[in-house]
Image (cartoon, rainbow, N blue to C red):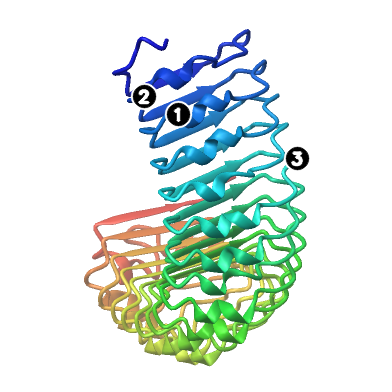
Amino acid sequence: MQCLTDLEKLKIKDCPEFHSLEGIGGLVMLKVLKIEGMPKLVELPEELGELKSLQKLCLSQCSNLSSLPKGVQCLTELQKLQIADCLELHSLKGIGSLMALKILKIRNMPKLVGLPEELADLNSLQELQIQQCPNLSSLPEGMQCLTELQTLQIADCPELHSLEGIRGFIALNILKIDDMPKLVGLPEELGDLNSLRDFQIRQCPNLSSLPKGMWNLTGLQILQLVNCPELHSLEGIGGLIALKVLEIDDMPKLVGLPEELGDLISLEKLHISTCPNLSSLPEGMNRLTKLSTLCIEYCTGLHSLEGIGGLISLENLEVNHVPMLVGLPEELGYLKSLRQLLIWWCPNVSSLPDGMQHLTELQNLQIMQCPQLEERCSINTGEDWAKISHVPDIHIWLCY
């Protein structure tokens, strides 16, 4: 292999008996090295550090690889390091010297208990992903020095209980947190991440509140809060004046949306799902004049849609599995931009409002499992047929 001095890419995959990479140091022009499915590989040779041109290193499914060689520190041109399913790998010591590293992805490393402090020396790092590290309990304090970091994604790390140390991420655009059952709070410094545009937090069952500083994120455009059952309030959300997408899903303790929701003057998409104790919408929703999509589903306590009449840009309205809803408001007729209306599994909606006939832009109407509406919307004979006969595409059906 030492003779292949011009080789730029090398991929070794699914070689269960392959146990050594000795001689690889001679591949002086190698830029990409991918090693996958080599269970008998227990170590990487020190000469790995001689690959001065290496820009991308991917190690996957090397279940007996326990550590990285010291030579890894010499990979000064390495821009991407990806390690996945290396079950015995317990340390990332030595990565602090990878001064050109821009992307670091770590997945399924059960023996990794911590990230080295030298992680803070990766001054060029732009993306960090940490997934399926069940024994990782904390992040290194020095992480705040990663001033070029743009994307941080942490998922399925059940022992990780704190995100302290993120305050220095002045360039962070995307922050995704998923499946961290021991996370009880977010640091106030979250509000200092002025570059943050996309914040997603999912499956954090013990997160009970959001930091007040978070509402200072005036550049935030996407906020997704999913399956955080202890989260009970969104007070302060009105400060997110650049927010375009808001998703609220599976928050059983949320009993109401704040009036300041109407201050989200840039909001274009609002998705509310599985909030069983939400009983009504705030009057302030009328001020969401840029909202184009509103989806409300599995909100079993919601009994009214009053307050939607001011949504003059709304094009898509979906109402799904809202059994307490007894009717649609007359102000529905004010939604002159509406092009699609879906009413699914709302058995107590007994009629359509007269204003429906004013929805001249409506192109698609779907009514499913609403038995009272099925009869009233019967072609030519139903009491509500005249209100919807102008709609080009109508689907009404029951599931038996």
Residue 21 in view (yes/no): yes
User: Where is mark 3, residue-wise?
Assistant: 111
Disc 3 to disc 1: CB gap under 8 Å: no
Circle 3 crowding by C-alpha within 10 Å: few under 14, some 14–19, many from 20:
some
Circle 1 crowding by C-alpha within 10 Å: few under 14, some 14–19, many from 20:
some
**Rendered location of residue 381, percent (x, y):** 36, 62
Residue 370 in view (yes/no): no
Q: Residue at x 33, y 56 (%)?
A: 394
Disc 1 to disc 2: CB gap under 8 Å: yes
Horizontal side of 20 relative to 199 (left or right) equals right
Q: Residue at x 47, y 88 (%)?
A: 239
Mark 1 residue element:
helix
**Rendered location of residue 153, percent (x, y):** 54, 55
Specify which label sits upstream in the sequence, 1 or 2.
Answer: 2
Q: Residue at x 40, y 20 (%)?
A: 10
In which quarter of the view is residue 139 placed?
A: bottom right
User: Where is mark 2, residue-wise?
Assistant: 28
Q: CA distance from mark 3 to mark 1?
A: 28 Å
User: Which kind of residue does numbered mark 3 sit on?
Assistant: Lys
Horizontal side of 171 relative to 297 (left or right) equals left
Q: Which mark is residue 50?
A: 1
User: Where is the N terminus found, in terms of image quarters?
Assistant: top left
Relative height, residue 52 to residue 17 (above, below): below
Relative height, residue 173 to residue 254 (above, below): above
Specify which label sits upstream in the sequence, 3 or 1.
Answer: 1
Viewer-nearest residue: 393 or 204: 204
User: Where is the C terminus found, in terms of image quarters?
Assistant: top right
User: Which kind of residue does numbered mark 1 sit on?
Assistant: Glu
Mark 2 residue element:
loop
User: Which kind of residue does numbered mark 2 sit on?
Assistant: Val
Specify which label sits upstream in the sequence, 2 or 3.
Answer: 2
Q: CA distance from mark 1 to mark 2?
A: 7 Å
